[in-house]
Image: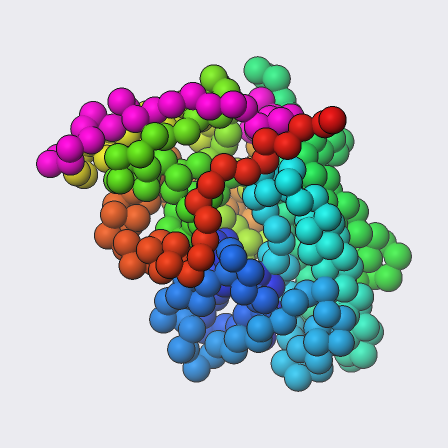
Amino acid sequence: MTIIVTGGAGFIGSALVRRLIAAGENVVTLDCLTYAGHLLSLGDALEAGNHSFERVDIRDADAVRDIFARHKPHAVMHLAAESHVDRSIDSPMDFVSTNVTGTVVMLQAAQEYWASLDAAAKEGFRFLHVSTDEVYGSLGAEGVFTEDTPYQPNSPYSASKAASDHFARAWHRTFGLPVLISHCSNNYGPYQMPEKLIPVIILAGLEGRDMPVYGTGENVRDWLHVEDHVAALELILRNGASGGTYNVGADAETTNIDMVRTICACLDELLPDSWHRPHDQLIRFVTDRPGHDLRYAIDSSRVRDELGWRPARALEQGLKATVAWYLENRWWWQSIREGGFEDKRQGLRTAV
């Protein structure tokens, strides 16, 4: 099977590509290599005989149509997106352009290609649109998001993803394109950009810098290891029902401040000779993000019961392995810094 993976040089996308290549699938990685896309994240998959790389912007309709015509895919796994909430506060139109317009370009190209297939190929084709639980908004102390929870996005990022979800669903209902939609909780693991919470804290601890925690740190997230997530995505693509929506979470809720303290404990253990021990002395509470959602929690019973998916990693186990990975793979995040990545706080713009 030939699968197009958009955003395949990003954090989740590269984990997915590595998994599919190892499974023997023919993979076409489509990525325009923004600041968040890095070919090094593909590892050995980059040189595999069953892998092709196309440097293409998903907003370029002609280039996207050409990809479909040349590679003749059996499926599309659409992950390409601007994803950092703080950046969406400073530059919302970038998120509208990539996440909304880019998704519509992909859907339109896929629909035109799908319409040209014979009946058997049409029946087997799938377009998996990968989204986020943030489209559902914020929870209080109780409750979980289900696939039927009404959308209530609270950031430009989540609003752009909600819009792209609606377009994906519309292409299924209006044009018959066999679309599936997934929503995941917060991912963590190797190759995550050093602008997200867990890498920010690991690298700050390693270098003895302040560890920034937004607000009081009481915001709650459900943490999902990226390799467990992509395992779920593969199952959804292969066995999910056309038109179906699937939530993917690991039932691993924790507050941000508890997450940071756990990372500090991992650093204390893994770096016994560090001058910065105990690492929790580096924690600093900083101005909160505007509109910061209080709590996310996701009900993934559908993907568990219907498709048989289970997360393989407990949070404590996965987090310790992730901390160790960043300590052992300085070459990766140092290459990003040397490439011009600015590790500075964003998203503090407020209404005037």
Q: Which residue is drawn at 54% across and 24% down?
A: 288
User: Where in the figure is residue 333, as x and y percent of width and height?
Assistant: 35, 54
Q: Is 301 placed left or right of 277 in the picture?
A: right
Nearer to us in this view, 35 or 187: 35
Is residue 170 found inside the magenta-colored segment of the image? no
Residue 248 seen anywhere in this rendered image of the structure: yes
On screen, 93 above or below 251? below
- Magenta-colored span: 272-297
x then y, percent, for residue 225: 43, 44
Q: How many labels does the image show?
A: 0
Q: Residue 200 placed where, x, y %?
A: 39, 39
Prevailing SS of the magenta stretch = loop
The structure residue drawn at horizontal position 43% and vertical position 26%, both measured from the top left corner, is: 213
Which residue: 71% across, 80% down?
A: 66
Rendered image quadrant of residue 176: bottom right
User: Is 295 contained in the magenta span?
Assistant: yes
